[in-house]
Amino acid sequence: MKLLSDATSATVRHMAAESDGYGYDISVETPSRSIHLEVKTTIRRGRLRIYLSRNEFETSTQDPTWVLTVLRLSHDLQPLAVATVDRDWLLAAVPADQTLGGRWESARLDVPPEATSSGMHPMVTSLLTSPVPILVGEPPWPG
């Protein structure tokens, strides 16, 4: 939240603090558009494992401005790297419902390096008004 708020004049709202029903954590809003970020964090350096709720996934399929963003943190929880997870990879990676009487509600996904791109999604970086190297791809992910 702070990285984005400091780097843009857009309104940055922590939606997950209001409700987990939105299907994303952060909204970045300008008068002409909104971008919805689902943010996952890790302190792991090599492997990226995330947990995605059914609501987050369904929101991703219906909201073209939904972006899955991952943030690698240091052991003292300082941001080290940001990456965007490829939407097509995500759509292919989630499990299929097996029966009419049941469906998955949460999925554990191991995201391969080739399914990520360093930095924030271009929709977000186009709104940045201050240079913040970590948000535009430095340092590389994963490292």
Image: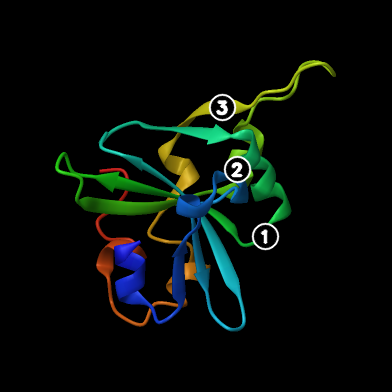
Would you say the residues marked 3 and 2 are in contact, meaning their CB atoms lie under 8 Å apart? no
Residue at mark 1 to residue at mark 3: CA–CA distance: 21 Å
Say which label, 2 or 1, has the lower sequence index: 2
In the displayed orientation, state which residue is furthest to the right: 100
Q: How many marks?
A: 3
Reading the image, the residue beneath label 2 is 56
At mark 1, the secondary structure is loop
Which amino acid is tagged 3? Answer: Ala
Residue located 33% across and 61% down the image:
137
Please tell me in which quadrant of the rendered image residue 82 appears.
bottom left
At mark 2, the secondary structure is helix
**Residue 135 image point, x, y percent:** 34, 64
**11 lies above or below 91:** below
Which amino acid is tagged 2? Answer: Glu
Reading the image, the residue beneath label 1 is 64
Please tell me in which quadrant of the rendered image residue 76 appears.
top left
Say which label, 1 or 3, has the lower sequence index: 1
**Residue 9 image point, x, y percent:** 40, 82
Residue located 45% across and 78% down the image:
10
Q: Nearer the viewer, residue 23 or 73?
A: 23
At mark 3, the secondary structure is strand
Marks 2, 1: nearer the viewer = 2
Residue at mark 2 to residue at mark 1: CA–CA distance: 13 Å
**Residue 25 image point, x, y percent:** 49, 52
Q: Determine whether, in the image, residue 82 is placed left or right of residue 18.
A: left
Would you say the residues marked 2 and 1 are in contact, meaning their CB atoms lie under 8 Å apart? no
Residue located 67% across and 60% down the image:
64
**123 lies above or below 62:** below
Placement of the N terminus among the 4 image quadrants: bottom left
Reading the image, the residue beneath label 3 is 107
Q: Nearer the viewer, residue 17 or 59?
A: 17
Asked if residue 68 shows in the view, the reply is: no
